[in-house]
Amino acid sequence: MKKRILSFILAVAMLSMLFAGCSQSSENKSGKKKETLKKITFVLDWTPNTNHTGIYVAKEKGYFKDAGLDVEIVQPPEDGAETLVASQKAQFCISFQDTMIPAITGDDALPIEAVAAVLQHNTSGIISRKGEGMDAPKGLEGKKYATWNLDIEKATLKQVVEDDGGDFSKVELIPSTVTDEVSALKSKSVDAIWIFYGWAGIATKVAKLDTDYFAFKDINPVFDYYTPVIVGNSKWLKENPDTAKAFLSAVKKGYEYSIENYKDAAEILCKAAPELDSKLVLESQKYMKDQYKAEVKQWGYIDSKRWNNFYNWINKNKLAESKIPENTGFTNDYLE
């Protein structure tokens, strides 16, 4: 009996030493191990706004860190965010299907492609003072429209005016100097402005300025293209598919959080960019929460038919340096 007791005590002691050794070894390994995060540079298209909220939420909530990423959000250079991505000085940026065209066509096409749609539908259109007859495109006849004098811009406007039975030649095109849509409309320096409703349109509501507005996609579905989109470097994406997927998965969480918690998301954006008008951000975020995914189940999904419809219209109107083949400039391969 004594031998059995002694053997039992000895066995317990040995097991205790063994577990203690394992625990110490684990602690030592844990203590020595340093978390290595992969660096990602993300370039905005403009100053921070509610198009970008999901990115800031993903950073603030630690979604990027959980995915093993250290994401730096930077402002775009003068020559555009796409240039940084093409040169691999950045991995991702915000762009737009229409403004991507010069970058993805011609002999000097850049190695970039859209990997996710920030919004599911084109929320841009024409805003004007309420009750002056510009609630439909034909009403722009004889009115002052602030133009950037871009070929695609003018072709789009011409198409919607003519689709509505109007005469585009009767629209007065004046060079745009608009930096504040509310002030421009109030001063009557212009009558009509191309805006993205989720920001500039909401700004007129916050300012309690009564306006009329029509969306391009409601006049002609060919204009329901993707704007904005997240763009990546094609070569880098192929070489780093897992990192790209991890990034977009974290971004998806950021936008889905913004959908479910728009007030908190607005606060996160204001914290990142305190120069923004918090009331405008909150009202814009309330509107945008229904735009990030709209009717689709998968945030970021790009419908090839809609993408191609717009570029086919570009081809038809000869608005690109060269013909754009179908399915050029986008992929869904890196979405969850």
Image (tube, grey):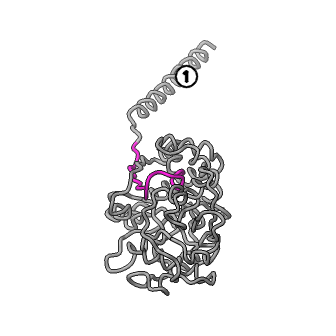
Q: Is residue 176 left or right of residue 214?
A: left
**Residue 24 location (% of width, % of height):** 45, 27
- In front: 234, or 87? 87
Examine the rendering and report whether any part of residue 104 can be seen: yes
Q: Quadrant of the N terminus?
A: top right
Q: Residue at x 57, y 53 (%)?
A: 203
Percent of width and height locating residue 40: 40, 52
Query: Circle 1 sits on which residue?
Result: 11
Quadrant the C terminus occupies = bottom right
Give the residues in magenta.
36-54
Vertical side of 43 occupied by 135: above or below = below
Amino acid of disc 1: Ala
Q: Residue furthest top?
A: 2
The number of numbered badges drawn on the structure is: 1
Residue at horizontal 49 percent and vertical 63 percent from the top:
189
Q: Residues within 10 Å of mark 1 (few under 14, many from 20)?
A: few
Residue 239, quarter of picture: bottom left
Residue 142: give x, y in percent of width and height. Answer: 55, 76
Camera-side residue of 189 and 64: 189
24 up-or-down from 128: above or below:
above
| Residue at x 66%, y 49% (from the top left corner) | 260
Q: Is residue 53 magenta?
A: yes
Q: Is residue 98 above or below residue 184?
A: below
**Residue 28 appears at what percent x and percent y?**
41, 30
Does the magenta-highlighted stretch encompass residue 38? Answer: yes
Q: Is residue 249 visible?
A: no
Helix, strand or loop at label 1? It is helix
